[in-house]
């Protein structure tokens, strides 16, 4: 069907034009991905990824469906390893330590790196218990401390005023947008360093999406954020850097302004101008 | 992508005249099929209705307070089934916790900890096989291990452990299904915050799966207290024993009592009525258990 030839073409192009992103030394690197390859069984889903995530920035990952962007973000907290057939090679250094090292305890990693999922996924528990879940599993039992964490996290996720009088109610009574902000609050409650967001607004209406986007702008003052989105306008609006993924490879990674105003790769330009994807 | 919509050539493949001619035959066949399937459904129902009618007409007049609270006796007019009722309750006391612990434990291991592979499929296949093993084989197993090797004798503990093994596959399979039905995104949320597997199981998976697990456990209990063969093999005495007061006492249960009264009905005709009356009591107990299971299932279904 000509698929193979097209794929080969992409490969050849990439080899001939491969660029190494030059890193400004003053920005602190949180995640440094080096030669990451990932397979689902025989399917080569991530090919030679080299990418650095910087502190207190929003890093957006864009690309068409099936390009590996969700796989990549799930590799950053090793969530991808919940799938038994996954094989990984290469290094991902988080604050200088390789998280793919067997000695790196995944529970430890996920305490520092929180995740917000595509579909709002609160537990079928009260709003309070949802937020207190993380602190509790990390051993905090003191009611006063928990109260403080819950309030601080809900305020941090800009949902405190909406739920402060109904903390004991089931989280399923909230609207979709509120549920997603609750999930962000739940993530903040473990006091993470990095927040990974996997298409956090794709299940939300425009108004809720706007609220979450504003929230992300607020959060980046204190957290480093990696966000996968299939919405290019969203990437342009909220991110500092953007990586464009295609067929499991990073085609281009640069400052968001540059990517959207002056992309250096033809395929990036084709994608952001809506010619495919 | 262009589908040709050219209709200029007017060849039709379906001839309306032929269709009309065949119409009556087609509709008739449909009616016959419906009739056959309706009859199949009714057959089971009618047989059940006849059975219940017979049991009730034979036994209902024998049920009274003395019958429910009395001891066993050779004299049909004075015989009561309190011993069998207590024996059934004691049996449940052993079966319920043992199956819950072993069954839910197995299900948790297979669904969350075990690596999916050959060993996993092998265990899974054997659990299904175990569910198909005839109950009398479990009786022989119980006789060999619990009654003789462990020298427990025909006591509640031996009978209960045997029954627990018998219904274990039911609990395992039901619990596995309940655990599998918990949406992945819930456990992912928990793992994503750095929870261990056990914390996730304890706080997220088990609470969500509990209704399904309870349903399976109750259904397995009702299976256990309705089984006869394993306990007959173990050697449950026919008559005249004191009420069981602990799991180390000898006992009898309702279906075993029904069994003995039915075979002895050749000697004393009234035993048939006693058996019928006991069946009614057993059916009511089973009905209550199964209804509880259904209520739990409906009440807690799909909350996420």
Image (cartoon, rainbow, N blue to C red):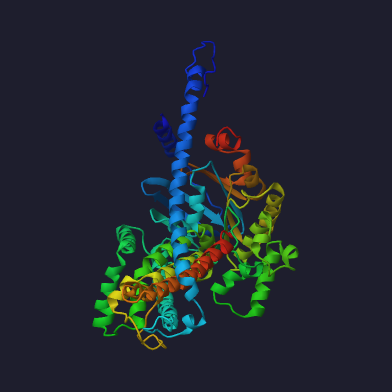
Where is residue A181? Give x, y as percent. 66, 59
Q: Quadrant of residue A116?
A: bottom right
| Quarter occupied by the C terminus of chain A | top right
Image check: A129 left or right of B131? right
B94 vs B66, nearest the viewer = B66
Where is residue A58? Give x, y as percent. 61, 54
A4 vs A97, nearest the viewer = A4
B233 vs A4, nearest the viewer = B233
| Number of numbered callouts drawn | 0
**Looking at the image, is A66 positioned above or below residue B251?**
above
Q: Residue at x 56, y 65 (%)?
A: B295
Image check: B112 left or right of B8? left
Q: Quadrant of residue A272?
A: top right
Is any atom of residue B42 visible in this view? yes
Is any atom of residue A248 visible in this view? no
Where is residue B275? Give x, y as percent. 40, 73
Q: Residue at x 39, y 75 (%)?
A: B270
Image check: A210 left or right of B279? right
Image check: B68 left or right of A179? left
Q: Residue furthest top?
A: B9
């Amino acid at each position: 069907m000509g698929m193979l030839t097209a794929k080969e073409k992409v490969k050849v192009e990439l080899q001939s034009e491969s660029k190494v992103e030059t890193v400004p030394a003053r920005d602190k690197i949180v995640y440094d991905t080096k030669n990451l390859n990932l397979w689902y069984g025989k399917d080569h889903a991530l090919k030679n990824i080299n990418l650095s995530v910087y502190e207190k920035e929003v890093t957006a990952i864009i690309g068409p469906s099936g390009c590996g962007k969700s796989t990549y973000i799930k590799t950053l907290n090793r969530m991808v390893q919940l799938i038994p057939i996954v094989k990984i090679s290469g290094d991902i250094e988080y604050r200088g330590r390789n998280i793919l090292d067997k000695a790196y305890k995944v529970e430890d990693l996920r305490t520092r790196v929180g995740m917000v999922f595509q579909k709002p996924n609160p537990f079928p528990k009260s709003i309070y218990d949802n937020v207190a879940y993380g602190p509790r599993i990390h051993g905090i039992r003191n009611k006063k401390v928990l109260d403080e964490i819950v309030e601080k996290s809900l305020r941090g996720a800009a949902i405190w005023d909406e739920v402060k009088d109904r903390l004991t109610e089931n989280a399923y009574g909230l609207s979709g947008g509120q549920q997603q902000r609750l999930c962000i609050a739940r993530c903040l409650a473990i006091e993470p360093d990095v927040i990974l967001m996997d298409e956090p607004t794709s299940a939300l209406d425009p108004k809720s999406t706007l609220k979450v986007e504003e929230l992300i702008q607020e959060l980046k003052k204190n957290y480093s954020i990696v966000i996968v989105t299939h919405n290019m306008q969203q990437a342009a609006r909220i991110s500092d850097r953007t990586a464009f993924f295609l067929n499991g490879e990073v085609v281009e990674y640069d400052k968001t302004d540059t990517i959207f105003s002056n992309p250096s790769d033809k395929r990036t330009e084709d994608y952001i101008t809506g010619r495919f994807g | 992508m262009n589908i040709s919509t050219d209709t200029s050539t007017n060849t039709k493949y379906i001839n309306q005249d032929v269709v009309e001619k065949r119409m009556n035959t087609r509709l008739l066949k449909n009616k016959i099929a419906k009739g056959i399937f309706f009859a199949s459904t009714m057959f089971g129902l009618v047989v059940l209705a006849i059975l219940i009618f017979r049991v009730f007409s034979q036994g209902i007049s024998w049920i009274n307070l003395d019958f429910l609270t009395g001891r066993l006796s050779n004299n049909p007019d004075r015989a009561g089934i309190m011993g069998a009722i207590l024996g059934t309750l004691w049996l449940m006391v052993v079966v319920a916790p043992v199956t819950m612990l072993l069954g839910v434990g197995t299900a948790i291991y297979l669904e969350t900890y075990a690596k999916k592979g050959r060993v996993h499929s092998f265990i899974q296949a054997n659990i299904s096989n175990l569910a198909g093993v005839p109950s009398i084989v479990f009786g022989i197993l119980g006789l060999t291990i619990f009654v003789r090797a462990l020298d427990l004798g025909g006591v509640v503990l031996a009978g209960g452990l045997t029954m627990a093994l018998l219904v274990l596959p039911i609990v395992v399979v039901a619990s596995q299904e309940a655990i599998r039905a918990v949406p992945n995104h819930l456990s992912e949320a928990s793992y994503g915050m750095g929870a261990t597997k056990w914390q996730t199981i304890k706080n997220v998976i088990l609470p969500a799966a509990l209704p399904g697990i309870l349903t399976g456990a109750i259904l397995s209990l009702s299976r256990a207290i309705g089984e006869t063969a394993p306990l007959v093999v173990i050697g449950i005495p026919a008559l005249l024993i004191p009420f069981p007061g602990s799991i180390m006492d000898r006992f009898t249960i309702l279906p075993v009592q029904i069994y003995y009264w039915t075979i002895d009905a050749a000697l004393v005709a009234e035993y048939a009525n006693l058996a019928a009356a006991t069946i009614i009591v057993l059916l009511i107990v089973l009905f209550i258990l199964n209804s509880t299971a259904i209520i739990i299932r409906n009440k807690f279904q799909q909350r996420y």
